[in-house]
């Protein structure tokens, strides 16, 4: 769990004027103001949450201090924004009485939510609707990151025989080690963890079953035993440890696919060999290494494409409930998931919102994979799949265009082109919701930065800050309205026309 607060950013032309409502009516705790004139307010606990009322980034960039009408309808008085905030359970009734006593614009009395909590809907002075929720009890396991949540390496503290070596040198040794990432990948690609799980523990037999040289495999196993990936149980005999249990295929953590050198992740991992070139030129090297861009590779290799889609679906399975929960879908009827992959997120949203229908747009081979997944989730009758490109016109007239984990694969011109397709398709009352990790946001910044390097070296994309998303949105004819964080580290960046 990050110790940074989860920060929702709401854009308004006059942060100071809106502050009183949030402090006096909703009982938020005022914090030190931001240097840029933004207002910071705290509310809730576990995780600690903050609301930042800020001038729209595009207004700041243009030096237009009075705002340009962007940000939750600020500037025109129209009720166009919708923010969802969660406060502690026992507060809702009290909050209702206080708000009523202060003449706040309440849309009704507290009401029951599907999850068993209470909800109160209030409008701020600009007509922005704020849903104040009692948090529903989190389902078991939420908030824990399986998959890519690599948390560093404890080997330094454990290593014997390192007396007298300065602390910084020990740190550097761990950082500069290039053997471990590849030794791990090779062991997984050879299927060693599965063999050990099946009771094959001798190196000779492991080598013959996996098609490896016995001496070389013995040296690999010895190295990985030093790293506590395997346990040495006798001469050239090994067993799984807690760490390598995670590397069995079929383990719910689903790590095998990320490390298998024959899959999509293995292929893009190898591009790090040319990171120097990417850093010198600012250009991805995937094409230099493999002769064509990643997406062309996928189009030509069904196996590679399936491996990629499976990884994305697996990653999405963990974050989808958190993303679905972070946004208020009650006013929407139709959601288009742009580059929605195998439909995991869309299925989760549709399952939780029986009134919604969905359209999934992705590459033809990917939507073929999505059909059975949508069927299995029981939402196929409310969902249409469209095999096509998000650089072409999108199905028009939906209430929400969701763009999840897509922007970071692309450079700025492609992102603007995708968002422009969304802007063309979305009606004035609709929303474009970008879902991604944010540079400088509440998610694990070390992980965001790791992804950023991967995007640089392999795809020519990047991770972005709120300001960078605001600029892309503006260039595509959209304006940033609100940033909804989730405990997954992903945020929903809500834009309108
Ligand atoms: C990183 S994945 C994200 C998938 C999904 N939204 C998620 O959050 O798991 C990027 C998606 O963009 C899709 N994609 C790439 N190029 C595309 C194109 N030109 N048109 C439509 N989809 C595309 C890929 O097939 C993939 O599903």
Image: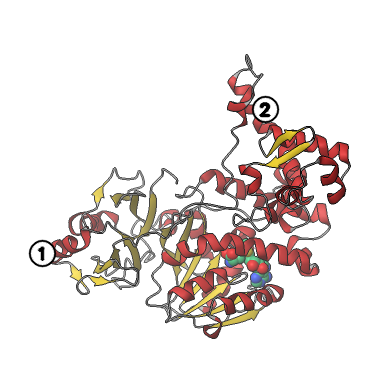
How many angstroms separate mark 1 from mark 2 (CA)?
Answer: 63 Å
Which color scheme did the rendering employ for the protein? secondary structure
As drawn, 234 above or below 99: above
| Residue 275 locus on image (x, y percent) | 73, 44
| Earlier-in-chain disc, 1 versus 2 | 1
- Quadrant of the snapshot with the C terminus: bottom left
Is residue 296 visible from the viewing direction of this image?
no
Q: Which residue lies furthest to the bottom in this view?
A: 381
Q: Residue furthest left?
A: 101
In the image, taking residue 224 as reference, residue 14 lies left or right, namely: left
- Name the residue nearer the viewer: 97 or 228: 228
In the image, taking residue 378 as reference, residue 391 lies left or right, namely: right
Secondary structure under tag 2 reads: helix
As drawn, 465 above or below 306: above
State the residue position of label 1.
101
Is residue 397 visible from the viewing direction of this image?
yes
- Name the residue nearer the viewer: 130 or 301: 301
State the residue position of label 2.
173
Q: Residue at x 30, y 73 (%)?
A: 78
Dot in front, 1 or 2:
2
Q: Which residue is drawn at 63% across and 62% down?
A: 312
As drawn, 370 above or below 271: below
In the image, taking residue 367 as reference, residue 493 lies left or right, namely: left
As drawn, 96 above or below 29: below
Give residue 373's quadrant in the image.
bottom right
Q: Which residue lies furthest to the top in this view?
A: 164
Q: How crowded is mark 1: few (under 14 residues within 10 Å), some or many (20 or more)?
A: few
Q: In which quarter of the image is ligand 1?
A: bottom right
| Residue 473 locus on image (x, y percent) | 51, 64
């Amino acid at each position: 769990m990050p110790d940074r607060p989860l920060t929702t950013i709401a854009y308004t032309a006059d942060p100071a004027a809106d502050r009183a409502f949030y402090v006096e009516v909703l009982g938020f705790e005022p914090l030190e103001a931001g240097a840029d004139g933004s207002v910071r307010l705290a509310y809730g606990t576990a995780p600690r949450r903050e609301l930042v009322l800020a001038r729209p980034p595009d207004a700041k960039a243009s030096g237009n201090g009075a705002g340009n009408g962007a940000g939750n309808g600020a500037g025109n008085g129209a009720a166009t924004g919708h923010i969802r905030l969660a406060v502690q359970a026992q507060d809702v009734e009290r909050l209702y009485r206080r708000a009523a006593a202060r003449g706040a614009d309440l849309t009704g009395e507290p009401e029951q939510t599907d999850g068993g909590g209470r909800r109160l809907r209030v409008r701020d002075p600009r007509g922005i609707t704020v849903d104040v929720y009692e948090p529903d009890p989190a389902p078991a396991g939420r908030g824990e990151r399986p998959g890519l949540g690599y948390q560093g390496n404890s080997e330094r503290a454990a290593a014997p025989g390192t007396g007298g070596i300065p602390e910084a040198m020990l740190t550097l040794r761990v950082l500069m080690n290039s053997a471990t990432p590849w030794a791990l990948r090779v062991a997984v690609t050879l299927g060693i963890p599965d063999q050990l799980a099946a009771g094959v523990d001798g190196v000779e037999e492991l080598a013959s079953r996996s098609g490896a040289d016995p001496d070389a495999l013995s040296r690999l196993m010895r190295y990985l035993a030093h790293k506590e990936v395997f346990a040495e149980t006798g001469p050239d005999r090994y067993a799984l440890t807690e760490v390598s249990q995670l590397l069995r295929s079929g383990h719910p953590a689903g790590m095998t696919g990320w490390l298998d050198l024959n899959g999509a992740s293995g292929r893009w991992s190898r591009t790090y060999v040319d990171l120097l070139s990417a850093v010198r030129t600012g250009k991805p090297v995937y094409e230099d290494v493999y002769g064509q861009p990643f997406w062309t590779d996928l189009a030509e290799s069904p196996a590679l494409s399936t491996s990629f889609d499976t990884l994305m679906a697996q990653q999405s399975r963990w974050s989808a409930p958190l993303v679905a929960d972070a946004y208020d879908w009650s006013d929407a009827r139709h959601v288009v998931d742009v580059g929605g992959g195998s439909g995991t997120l869309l299925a989760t949203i549709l399952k939780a919102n029986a009134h919604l229908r969905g359209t999934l747009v992705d590459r033809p081979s990917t939507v073929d994979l999505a059909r059975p997944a949508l069927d299995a989730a029981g939402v196929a009758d409310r969902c249409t799949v469209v095999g096509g490109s998000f650089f072409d016109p999108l199905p028009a007239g939906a209430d929400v265009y969701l763009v999840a984990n897509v922007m970071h694969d692309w450079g700025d011109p492609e992102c603007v082109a995708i968002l422009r397709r969304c802007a063309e398709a979305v009606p004035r009352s609709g929303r474009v919701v970008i879902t991604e990790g944010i540079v400088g946001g509440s998610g694990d910044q070390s992980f965001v930065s790791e992804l950023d390097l991967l995007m640089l070296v392999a795809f020519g994309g990047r991770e972005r800050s709120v300001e960078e998303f605001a600029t892309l949105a503006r260039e595509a004819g959209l304006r940033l309205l609100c940033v909804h964080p989730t405990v997954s580290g992903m945020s929903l960046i809500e834009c309108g026309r």
